[in-house]
């Protein structure tokens, strides 16, 4: 038992130095009171270091060993581990002495500490050096850290695209066209509460759209666009929860995929992963919703989800024809059924003004075609989407979409699109992905006579056939070769088929 007389509260090592071992009561065995410490196994009983530390552990409750209940005090590399325990003991005794009151420490225990320190002098010195170095490094990281609330994630795509053969939408031969460029993104992800997300995406594009050669939106690559390499704010939104089941997204620049499940889990990689084409990435109905506004995503249960949103295309422009409600816009409502973890079925409705499907034929993108002529287009689009994971390495999906379009003061048109998708996750090795897409990009199936007079008609049916294989070179680099075959380009059988070959390399960091 500790003696009734407290010792001086000067620093412990000073106290040990000041007292003489000869002053210790030799009649008291410091190891005489040892209780069971079976949790500190792996240290051989009988070893002096084991017995000495055991007495201090039991007496002062200083260390408890490793999480698995072991204490490895006399094995290879364990002298440093044991030195850490000795240091913890010294720190604990110092804490006891620092508290005012009768904090008695036995002289015998001070002697044990003195001997332990002497026997592990080298290890303690190295340990203190490592602790000091770690402390200095931590301080340096805190000073040089980008932000305590923001994480930076980067993504770079190098893309090669080529059209070896085919005719454009006007029936002219496409000379061998090969392009090489990039899409670079930096995502700044900021959390202020731990449950919210402020996303700021900086993007630069240096890969032009193939539609500049094909003269049709069909077959456009999902990662292509501008060629200027200008840095722009491509996405800016704030997502926060109202409760455990409801997320709200307030966006200055976003699209439907930021608050809606696009029901294409393996192929929708936003151009960086999955499908190579814009059409194969997600159902065309979602491209009608982009800009600034608000979205809400609510889970009624694990099996039922509702998404609502409104985004205006020129919300920041105060001029006539601009603003949140007077410019182009898209309003979305979607119900998502998830009967199991491997199955999803979506029912989607989008009401849009002067917003196109951004895929399919020229005539299927009426706003782009007729706005320059002074006509406005209102659309009501309906979609059914589904995804079924038959096995861990086989997923079947697809969608069907119908758009009722009205060219104001001119007439109506009907537009259809559909696709069947096959995905093969982890094919060849973990992280790889093979995909097949067969479908019909948006096509005008019938139209008012007044629209036919404007040349709005798709006489034939074009099929979109796409195959790719995404090979994961490392955790941060993937290589995806693929081919896109367009029959009857721009839904016109008079045009020779177009073949598009591409290789996408994605770097994530």
Image (cartoon, grey):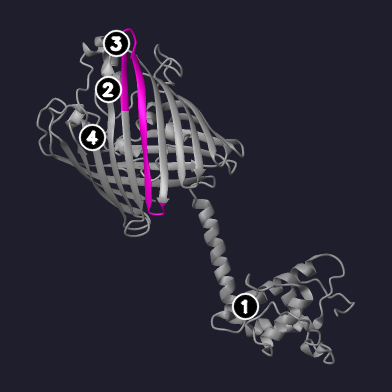
The residue tagged 2 is 444
Q: Nearer the viewer, residue 335 or 375?
A: 335
Q: Which residues are magenta?
A: 391-416
The answer to whether the residues at label 4 and label 2 have Cβ atoms under 8 Å apart is no
Q: Residue at x 52, y 39 (%)?
A: 197
Q: Is residue 401 magenta?
A: yes
Query: Can residue 117 be seen by looking at this rendering?
Result: yes
Label 3's element?
loop
Q: Residue at x 34, y 60 (%)?
A: 429
The answer to whether the residues at label 4 and label 3 have Cβ atoms under 8 Å apart is no
Label 1's element?
helix
Spatial CA distance of label 3 from label 1 is 82 Å
Spatial CA distance of label 4 from label 1 is 72 Å
In this view, 262 is above or below 119: above
Residue 451 x %, y % = 25, 12
Q: Is residue 245 left or right of residue 418?
A: right
Q: Nearer the viewer, mark 3 or mark 2?
A: 2
Q: Residue at x 64, y 78 (%)?
A: 71
Q: Nearer the viewer, mark 4 or mark 3?
A: 4
Spatial CA distance of label 4 from label 2 is 14 Å
Label 4's element?
loop
Q: Nearer the viewer, mark 2 or mark 1?
A: 2
Q: Nearer the viewer, residue 335 or 175?
A: 335
Residue 47 x %, y % = 67, 89
N-term mark: 3 or 1: 1
The residue tagged 3 is 374
N-term mark: 4 or 3: 3
The residue tagged 1 is 83
The residue tagged 4 is 463
């Amino acid at each position: 038992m500790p003696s009734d007389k407290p010792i001086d509260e000067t620093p412990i090592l000073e106290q040990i130095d000041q007292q003489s071992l000869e002053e210790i009561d030799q009649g008291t065995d410091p190891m005489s009171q040892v209780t069971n410490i079976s949790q500190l196994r792996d240290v051989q009983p009988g070893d002096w270091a084991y017995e000495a530390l055991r007495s201090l552990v039991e007496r002062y409750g200083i260390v408890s060993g490793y999480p698995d209940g072991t204490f490895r005090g006399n094995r290879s590399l364990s002298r440093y581990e044991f030195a850490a325990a000795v240091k913890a003991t010294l720190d604990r005794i110092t804490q006891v002495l620092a508290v005012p009151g009768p904090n008695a420490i036995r002289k015998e225990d001070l002697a044990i500490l003195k001997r332990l320190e002497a026997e592990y002098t080298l290890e303690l010195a190295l340990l203190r050096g490592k602790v000091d170095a770690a402390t200095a490094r931590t301080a340096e990281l805190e000073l040089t850290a980008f932000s305590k609330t923001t994480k930076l994630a980067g993504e770079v795509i190098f893309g090669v695209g080529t059209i070896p053969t085919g005719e454009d939408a006007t029936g002219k031969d496409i000379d061998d066209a090969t392009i090489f460029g990039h899409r670079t993104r930096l995502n700044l992800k900021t959390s202020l509460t731990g449950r919210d997300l402020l996303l700021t995406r900086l993007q630069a594009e240096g890969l032009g759209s193939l539609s500049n050669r094909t003269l049709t939106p069909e077959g456009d690559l999902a990662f292509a666009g501008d060629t200027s390499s200008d840095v722009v704010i491509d996405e800016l939104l704030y997502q926060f929860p109202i409760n455990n089941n409801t997320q709200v997204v307030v966006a200055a620049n976003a699209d439907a995929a930021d608050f809606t499940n696009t029901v294409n889990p393996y192929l929708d990689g936003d151009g960086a992963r999955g499908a190579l084409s814009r059409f194969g990435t997600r159902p065309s109905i979602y491209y009608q919703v982009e800009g600034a506004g608000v979205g809400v995503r609510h889970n009624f249960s694990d099996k039922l989800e509702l998404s609502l949103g409104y985004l205006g295309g020129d919300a920041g422009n105060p001029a006539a024809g601009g603003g949140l409600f007077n410019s182009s816009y898209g309003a979305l409502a979607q119900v998502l059924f998830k009967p199991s973890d491997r199955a999803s079925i979506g029912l989607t409705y989008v009401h849009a003004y002067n917003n196109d499907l951004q895929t399919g034929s020229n005539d299927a993108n009426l706003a782009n075609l007729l706005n320059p002529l002074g006509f406005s287009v209102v659309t009501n689009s309906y979609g059914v989407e589904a995804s079924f994971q038959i096995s861990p390495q086989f997923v079947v999906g697809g969608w069907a979409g119908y758009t009722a379009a009205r060219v104001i003061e001119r007439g109506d048109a009907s537009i259809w699109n559909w696709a069947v998708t096959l995905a093969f996750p982890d094919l060849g090795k973990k992280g790889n992905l093979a995909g097949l897409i067969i479908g019909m990009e948006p096509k005008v199936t019938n139209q008012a006579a007044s629209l036919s007079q404007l040349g709005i008609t798709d006489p034939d049916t074009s099929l979109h056939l796409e195959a790719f294989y995404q090979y994961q070179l490392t955790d941060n680099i993937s290589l995806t070769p693929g081919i896109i075959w367009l029959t009857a380009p721009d839904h016109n059988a008079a045009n020779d088929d177009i073949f598009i070959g591409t290789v996408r390399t994605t770097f994530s960091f």
